[in-house]
Amino acid sequence: MKAPSKCFVIKEMLRMDFEKTRYLFQQKFSSANGVSLDLNFSIPDSRRITEVIEKGNEIYDPAIAAHCIRSYFFGKIFANIEKKKIDDEVFFVGSFLHDIGLNQSSSSVTFEVAGANCASQMCQRSFSNTEISIISEMISLHDAIGMANSGSSELKFLHMGAGLDVAGLWSYLLPEDLILKVYREVPANNFSNTIVSLLKERMREHPKMFLSTLIRLGFYGKIKKWHREVLNKIGSEVL
């Protein structure tokens, strides 16, 4: 997928800032209570999910695997807030495998496409073609700012969940204690340094990959800033 123009990315960032400002303004004058959810830290329990986790962990850096689990939890929270029904097993697999290509060198395709191809092969025996299609969409477009919201609900909520965990995007929609609860349950384990290092490797292979525009606009700094803030608030884990 071709990298978007700087103008497009800046426009999307401004749109997101406007949505945040509007939401916070509405909340200030709203009499409704804030978000209150009982977060259940569990993942789907089935043989095919266990197989996916085992295969994924053979490839993943542990810090990236933990990020993918947090992305799943955050995405589930956003889906619950919007009262949207998603296929939980498909959503978990797409979430857990969404960065599987990040840990693998590929000169022919970007890490998103490599990850989608890898996941499709992993899921070939246990998932239907329809399920694999959604999983592939989730992985190949999970970081597609300005595009992910127009796909499946599973893609949308992975995009939001991963965006929150990577750089605090959409964090204003959730209570701080709920966010920190996720980080305490699934520690970040030096995630910010790990993902920046891996993204730099993939950028050397594909200087014009989709995230390249965002990276050139300072995305690495945003990643590190968010995780410093979380570290300061929970005061124990190494982020």
Image (spheres, rainbow, N blue to C red):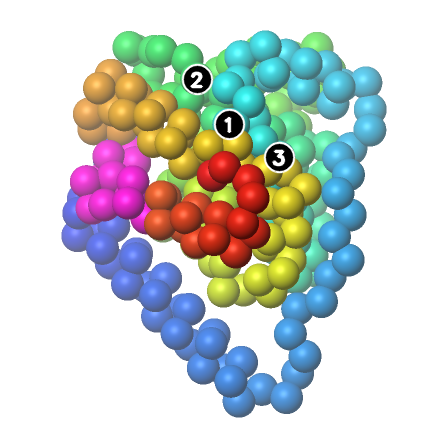
Mark-to-mark CA distance, 1 and 2: 9 Å
Q: Which residue is at 36% across, 23% downward?
A: 198
Q: Earlier in the sequence, mark 1 or mark 2?
A: 1
> Which mark, residue 142?
none
Contact between marks 2 and 3 (CB within 8 A): the answer is: no
Q: Is residue 230 above or below residue 56?
A: below
Q: Which residue is mark 2?
A: 103
> Which mark, residue 64?
1
Q: Which residue is at 46% across, 33% downward?
A: 191
Assign the N terminus to one quadrant of the image: top left
Q: Which residue is mark 3?
A: 69
Contact between marks 1 and 2 (CB within 8 A): the answer is: yes
What x and y, as percent, mark residue 213? 22, 40
Check disc 1 and report its element: helix, strand or loop.
Answer: helix
Q: Earlier in the sequence, mark 2 or mark 3?
A: 3
Q: Is residue 135 above or below residue 126?
A: below
Check disc 3 and report its element: helix, strand or loop.
Answer: helix
Amino acid type, label 1? Ile
User: Is residue 130 in view from this perspective?
Assistant: no
Range of the magenta residues? 210-222
Q: Earlier in the sequence, mark 3 or mark 1?
A: 1
Residue reaching furthest to the front:
236
